[in-house]
Image (cartoon, rainbow, N blue to C red):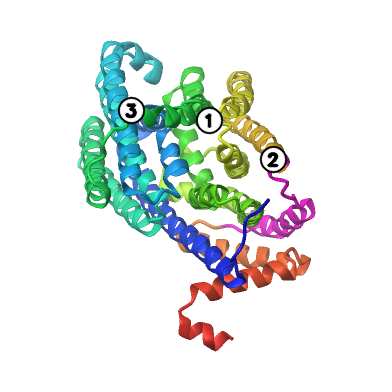
Amino acid sequence: MDNQKGDTPAQKITESGIFIRDIIWVAIAQVLTLFVVGIAALPALTKHYGPEIYGIWVQISVTVTLLSPFIAMELDMSVIRFLAGEEDKVKRRKSLGSMLISIIIFSIMVFLLINIIAPQLSGLLFADPKYVTFIRLTFIWVITDALYIFFSSYFRARKKIRFLSIRQVSYGIAFMLIIIIMSSMGIKLEWLVGCIIVMQSVFVLLFFFLIVKEIGYPIPNINGIQEYLAFSLPQIPGVALIWVIGSSDRYFITHFLDLSQAGIYSSSSQIAVLTRLFYSPISYVLYPTLSRLWDENRFSEVRSYLQHSIRLLLTLGIPASIGIAMLSQPILKILTTTEFLAGRELVFFIALGTVFMGIYQINSQVILLKKQTRLLPLIIGAASVTSMILNIVLIPNIGISGASIAYLASCFLLAVIASFIARRSNNYSYDGIFQLKITVASLPMAIYLFLIKVDKLWEIILAAAAGAVIFVSGVLLLRAFPEKEKQLVKNIILNLLPTSMKKKNN
């Protein structure tokens, strides 16, 4: 039974307000980081290095994305699941110490192995064994990124979202400056990667010292590590398989086509995955919130948070995927050169696939709450096999568009399976009529953006704003949101306002 004694409406509004406020903080940080890094770094890399060297950069980036969670052994998820509601500093210190020493030992073992097989890995990643230096740099970056993720998860578990958001923006700005300055000076890519590693190491040390200041030096507790690893290790195959879905297409493109085509595909993908902004902040804040509510047996609130999170994602993600696709080619013309244009259909497939990935990310949190992590590799495995088969079949026949179709199909399968499990486990409702209304409201916006011709940045901004107005008008005409949800939104907004402004509204 749900344990909700003592929960007044005001308290629920306050919790909802905090949840929304944290999402806003994360969204602002991710928007700034994506636009700062994406808008500034993409043209710097593509115009100063060209498609082939940019293709090497892409391979390094996707490899870091794949292997960082592997090196961290997904213990960052254990930090959130087990320490989100833990108020005992001694227990937090011992738990964190156990996880940290495990990561350090595993990192050393993997790096020694990488040095031995570096030439073979160079042939695998870059289709050429001569890039051994990049292999070593890549895996040093993987280790620093794993530690960055791990330490960040502690502050995420402790609900220090504002702190993390500010640090993330700072990290993004430093990342951008390194790329712009070094690429414009014609400095080799290996030195650029090395500087990024040094910069990230500084942030890792900062996080470590702040944690030590709060709870003391992490002291390993060998007895406790078994429970954390039992929760985390089953997720590692799932992480690798998620990477197969989201990033392995670059490897298939490199081997079936060439590095230049991988760079072209990646530039379109970087525009398309802007739709990640409409689920990543929700998922980031949702998991520690649900972990705390679940441990407190407040299951009806868990269900409510899941339902509203999915509705928020669909409300923003569906029109965003259409709008981004329609405006993608003029955006790429500004940011890159004409050889990087691959068509808006490709961008739409990736953008829509990213929305489905968001549905999976939100619904799969129910599996984490129930500590049934052994299910995740099975679910993701089915989707990753679909992705690989479609990539192998489609890329040689229709080019890089085949990779976007494979991504869309595999993400859709993930979303369907995760939604089925979540609804069955938590008994929350799915409103198909709502999704239909959101889709219908997006169609006039799509027609408008298809017909309008834009070339300059200010024209793109105006077109996007006009498209948003058309979509919102359609939502209002179709009455997509019931009065109860409108009141909830109003209460949340009022809760975010200063006390003096609340009184005026009342």
- Rate crowding at label 3 as few (under 14), some (14 to 19) or many (20 or more) other CA atoms within 10 Å: some
Residue 437 painted magenta: yes
Q: Nearer the viewer, residue 75 or 403?
A: 75
Q: Position of residue 267 (x, y in %)?
A: 46, 39
Q: Which residue is mark 1?
A: 242
Frontmost residue, 282 versus 447: 282
The answer to the question of whether label 2 and label 1 lie on touching residues, with beta carbons closer than 8 A, is no
Q: Is residue 440 above or below residue 407?
A: below
Amino acid type for the residue under numbered disc 1 = Ile
Name the residue carrying label 2.
Answer: 425
Q: Which residue corresponds to mark 3?
A: 222
SS majority, magenta: helix
Q: CA distance from mark 1 to mark 3?
A: 30 Å
Going from the N terminus, do you reach mark 3 or mark 2 first? 3
**Does residue 367 appear in the picture of this structure?**
yes
Q: Which numbered disc, 2 or 1, marks the residue closer to the eye?
A: 2
> Looking at numbered disc 2 in the image, what kind of residue is underneath it?
Ser
Sequence-first disc among 1 and 3: 3
In the image, residue 503 sits, relative to residue 324, either above or below, namely below
Q: Earlier in the sequence, mark 2 or mark 1?
A: 1
Q: Is residue 466 magenta?
A: no
Q: Quadrant of residue 492?
A: bottom right
Going by the numbered disc 3, the residue's amino acid type is Ile
Magenta segment: 424-453
Tag 1 secondary structure: helix
Residue 328 located left or right of residue 130? right
**Looking at the picture, how far across and down is residue 77, in whole percent?**
45, 38
Which mark lies nearer to you, 3 or 2?
3
